[in-house]
Image: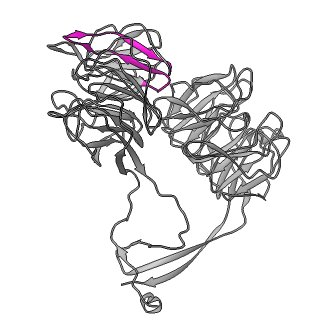
Amino acid sequence: MTDYKTIKGFSIQSVATDPKVTGVAGGTWASGGNLNTGRRALAGAGTQTAGLAFGGLITATSALSEEYNGSSWSVGNVLNLARHNIAGCGTQTAALAFGGEVPPGGFQNESEEYNGTSWTEGNNLNSARQALAGCGTQTLGLAFGGNLNPSSVSALTEKYDGTSWTEVGDLNTARKTLAGFGIQTAGNAVGGASDAAVNESFNGTSWTEVGDLNTGRDYLAASGITTAGLVFGGNVNAQTESWDGTSFTERADLAAGRYGGAGGGSQTAAFYAGGSNPGTANHQSTEEWTTATITDAIINEGDVYFNTATNLIRLSKKIFGTGAWASGANINSARSEFGGGAGTQSAFLIFGGQADPLAQLTESYDGSSWTEVADLNTDRYYSAGLGTQTAALCVAGNPGVQVNVESWDGSSWTEIANVNTGRWGLGSSKSSPYTSALVFGGKTSTADVANTETWNGTAWTEVNDLNTARRQVGSCGAAQTAALVMSGMPAPKVVVEQWNGTSWTEVSDLGASRYGGGGAGTTTSALFIGGAPNSKANESWNGSAWTEVADTAQVHDVAASGGTALSGIVAGGRGTGQSAHFTEEWTVPISIGNISVDVD
């Protein structure tokens, strides 16, 4: 065997661990912009790039409200009632504030709604209290725990439907100064006085005790959803813990231990603003939590690290063959105008669609056969789909230009928070985790739109629009921060736009204009499949240009599509009668050549 050191004149370093940890395990806190006014016992809502902080205690109780754009805070219109130990939920443009205290001892049932400009009084909580927690959205909120009076700690839980509050099942453990994350039908209540580690999960009706925090604490903050949460701060505590739906794991600490700050965002992108600790002034500082990611790339210079338990390294070279389509199993119920697709070629999910009658049907594919599973709650077609075979979203659609969104947990569909703009024929970042979705384009009852919305697992937020308003688009993407939108109506288009997490940019056009085609893959390696008028065309994207590759056997217009640019899938759609139940699978053969290298 060749000694690589002898040839090149230096040793290759072999390390026993990965040089970079990805995902929530590699997450860290970094400094963000300061609040204009430092305070504690305030509440937060929204996301890391569109956050909201309101109420709190300076030296006196405050009505201040501030908005965050990911860099700096700006002062907005104040609450109608100044208070601290307040709770909140929702987004920057659709927030809910409830409960709190006006000293001395004036516990409040006041509830207010924020529309992005001003606060409006709504119907009150049934029980006045302070130091409570909440989660959900402005129209589907949840309030729990707190103090009913100085000597009575509460287990009360109330639901908000956008108009009024209704009492539902109590917490198992009454507590105050706790935190909440999730949505109204799938929330968590965590921590609380006195240094409680208790964690309870809500199913829309009742609470169940689940895995506890590693470190009990009160006056803490939280973000995320019931299967992917983040808890931080509290009790002059800098600790951060992530929740995976079963247990908490300790993660990187905040730079400054503090309690009573405002938190918001998701498990992968959160903020923590304000707060205090004994003997110091109230904090103005904001910290931002970001998880680590690695993007595959070819590196032409620099250090290459290998993780190996031996001194033998095998270097592999991939050689890609010519892609081709092959027939898969027919779907059980022929249809088109799908609600989208979610997953991979061997683990795919389709739902909704246009049939006779309209379809609520959901079918799951294992690479060999389709199986009917639980139906959607609402008939729909021309909606957007994304996620995986076991964790997906079905967003908006027709009939009736819907705003409804449903989430799939592998066995059933649950209605969650609505999108801000009802529409049909919209696109999505198909491969996004369903907790961090992106949807765009479509048509309202009157016009094609360019609206783009992001989902953080709790609420939808409007972000920067497409450059070209359109419907019946093709789309794909690997994440909420990386998506492609292709073609569309009115009038068949060649226009392609790429999303970078902030804005859309026009990139190279398709080779042929069409609409209603399907997408698969990522922003650097994608397919655009079929479409109308009467197209079997298939184009491949390498990150800079489109190339025509092998056609499908059938016309697939407004079909369900997904997978990758090397292993894609398309099912159903308009065309011939056969197309409506036909499945085709795309495969690019790969061969690998190996070179073995001895290292010191």
As drawn, 268 above or below 116: below
Work out whether residue 225 can be spotted.
Answer: no
Question: Which quarter of the image is occupied by the C terminus?
Answer: bottom left
Colour mode?
A: one colour
Looking at the picture, tell me which residue is in the foreground, 412 or 515: 515
Q: Is residue 136 left or right of residue 383?
A: left
Residue under the point 38% across and 58% down: 21
Q: Is residue 351 left or right of residue 15?
A: right
Label count reads 0
Camera sees residue 72: yes
Nearest to the observer: residue 522 or residue 75: 75
Name the quadrant containing residue 341.
top right
Task: Locate residue 318: give its quadrant.
Answer: bottom right
* Residue 120 position in % (x across, y down): 45, 11
Residue at 37% across, 81% down: 311
**106 inside magenta stretch:** yes
Q: Position of residue 11 (x, y in %)?
A: 39, 84
**Residue in the picture at 46% in, 14% down:** 161
Measured as percent of width and height from the top left, residue 231 is found at: 31, 37
Left or right of residue 525, residue 168 in this image: left
Q: Residue 235 at what x, y percent from top left?
A: 19, 34
- Check the image and report above or below for 3 versus 393: below
Please provide the residue range marked out in magenta.
90-115
Q: Is residue 463 magenta?
A: no
At x 32%, y 14%, the residue is 82
Rendering quarter of residue 331? top right
Position of 375 relative to 103 (above/below): below
